[in-house]
Image (tube, coloured by chain):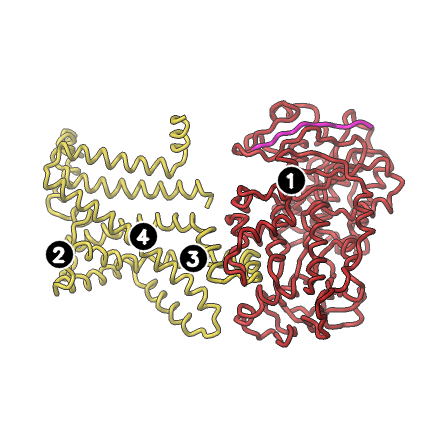
Amino acid sequence: MIATKLGEFYRDKDKRWLSIWVAGLLALWIWDLVFLNAPALARIEAAFVNTLYAGALVVFMSLVFGWAAGVGLHFLDEARNRSPYIVLTFFLNVIRSIPQIVGILIGYVVITFFIEQEALQNQYAQLFWMSFVISLFVFLEVVDLVRDRIRYFAASDFYPAMLCCGIRESRIVNIEVLWKNSRAHLIHKLIAIFGSAIFLQCSIDFIISVGLSTDVSSTNFPVTLGSLLAKMDSKQDILAIGSLFGDLSVFGRLLTEHLQGVSVAVVIVFSLLCIYQISNGFVKRNSL
Amino acid sequence: MSDLSFNIRIAVGGRTLVDIDHFRIRENAVTFLFGESGIGKSLISRALFGLLAPEEYTITVNGEPYESYLCGPWPAAFQKNGFFVFQEPSTHLNPLLTIKNQLHEGSLAQAPDEAPILRQLWSGMEDKTVRGLLEVFPKPYRPSGGEKQRMLLVMAFKKLEMMLAGSPPDRPPLFVFDEPTGSLDNHFRDLFLAMLFSRFRQRAFSVLLISHDYSMISHVQRAHADLTGSIAYKELVSHAGLLALQDFLPETYLNWLNRQHPAPPATGIMVESAPLVTVESKVEVFGRTLAITRDRSARSEVPMEINRGSMVYLKAPSGTGKTTIVKLMMGLASGSRFRMALGTMTVTETTPREVWRKRIWGKQMTMVFQHADEALNPHSTVEETFHGLPSRKKQMREDITRTLRELFDPEDVTEEFLKKEVRLLSGGQKQRLNLLRGLFLDTDILIVDEPLNGLDFESTTKVISMLQKKQEAGKGILLISHNEEIFDRQVPREHVFYLKAGP
């Protein structure tokens, strides 16, 4: 019975990769527990937790902003007064026109300003605003999806049939279309946004940590996987991988002596790969 | 004459779709198979014809696995000399081949020339126009549904001609027609039946004709009375999850039909002199002009009025724009010329949507859409389908249950049924639920588009009775239906309007 259930669980690609992700991270953590020094392990743990926390916040905020903006645009589009629709569309298009990395960097500058003014000291509040900035540049994907789903149902008899029965349009859109018929689509989008959030976070944190910006630095931001990867000792660990090409005997030392950088790199790459596979599996399982 | 009898079980993913003992087809006879949409008529016939993929379903036929049945004599015999006309013509035709090429594909290449069949099925149309159709690569909207359906019938008739030209095969060939007239009006339906029976008179063969159109019975009884002994009427019914094939006595339908008459005038309700709704006779929409007329010849254009307690019947050939007109009335389409008086209010092509939202939808008017599959939320439960309807802030479960019992077997309306997702219902059950949602509301005007689609005889009679009750309660009903035989008896002639498409 248990074997059958496990077999069924394992057949679904998304569930399989979710278990691979968890098992892989657990194995790495045990390995680090044995071979990595305690302060470095604590840094990796904090960076991982912070990155996941920020990623989850980005997902949550993108869902809230995307749902609100998508539904808002739908209703404004139908209103007789077109001005609010045009203003909101213009505002969203402005965000759309800014490259994500540039936009997030500008947001980080603002956050740094508040940190320097000592108006933003709590580490979780800092992570909250970092996530807010990232979600501001990724939530448009949810807006587009929400609008697509509403348009799809509005074009079939589904939406007008409910309208004719006098069912409130807000109920049709929010409950009937988005909640009951688009949950899988939204979850898939949010998985992709979670991956993007981790990628963007790591990229930006790495960029600011290696000093491309003079206004922001890794010293005044909570530690994340990206900023930890940019630290000198991590970079040395990563460089050690290169010496493998000349001397294979380095491999053993790599897994026991250069663990901070290698672990962080593995967590980032392995997580992104697993999220990608989970997302693909989810699409397949739900026939999206 | 003997029977071909089969015991069939079909399941998918552990869910039983069909379980029937003694599915009988009379050999060398025409079997009309009626039954509610989604009950399993098509699935059973496809299984017997050997058209289902064994890897997708768990199937047993006469106790043997489907793989064994496929290797047995029946599917080969059916396919070699018979033909299967699919319900949905678009899925049958290959969009990458011209229709002409498809008429000569496979064994059809050896069949006699199709020109005489085309002339018969396109009676009254120029040869040049029909020949033009043969060069078309079929697409979703071209040729029309009716033309595609007739092309499939041409293929079936070619195969029939081949079979009739040769010596009788050892095993009886089977011709399955799955809703062969679903996209045809009564003229072409009768034409098809005449062509089929004329060939049947040459030499008998086995036909399984699946349909929801019970009015075929009266036509066949009237026009092909000489074949009564070679025609069987069957109905597929469900009892406690098991299917049964029952004889359907033509008298059951014919006697019921003879008892039908317009509903009596509403009693105890003040019948106002002003109509509930009046639609101006000329409408312009999507660059076309539509005119509402009193007679089929479209000589006298008149406004369409719906009064309290009356049922108005709007008729027109498929594709003329009947559904478009009612969508305009419901504010779901925008025309360039449209005027409707709704009580004291005048609605035109410029009336904002807000008016419909605040004053019309679900309050004064409601509409039951033609395709229940699209009109209902597949991920809602049966009970949730009634949630959110106006004027009943919290739908009491008892009200919903009572309403459901009007069209569903009371024993079936259980807690489990209320919690069942709509996507798991059969096509006929969805149609009944779709109708009930509209009938649940207390609007003065009810528009019903093809209300008998996919229903079995029992549900048909119940729906007619419910519509009559609405009339008796003083509601006005606008009806669109191709079931002319049934509704011509419900609606007095002065309440019948015709729609004519202009340039």
**Amino acid marked by disc 1:** Ile
Name the residue: 24% across, 49% down: A53
Crowding near pointer 3: few (<14 within 10 Å), some, many (20+)? Answer: many
Q: Secondary structure at mark 3?
A: helix
* Amino acid type, mark 3: Val
Subunit under mark 3: A
Q: Nearer the viewer, residue B394 or B252?
A: B394
Q: Of circles 2 and 1, which is in front?
A: 1
Residue A220: mark in rendering: 2
Q: CA distance from mark 4 to mark 2?
A: 24 Å
Q: Residues within 10 Å of mark 4 (few under 14, many from 20)?
A: many
Marks 4 and 1 sit apart, C-alpha to C-alpha, by: 44 Å
Q: Which label was assigned to residue A146?
A: 3
Chain A rendering hue? yellow
Q: Reading the chain from its start, which is encountered first: label 4 or label 2?
A: 4
Query: Front-most of A283 and B497?
Result: B497
* Nearer the observer, B155 or B405: B405
Direction from residue B426 to residue B419 in the image, left or right? left
Q: Which residue is mark 1?
A: B39
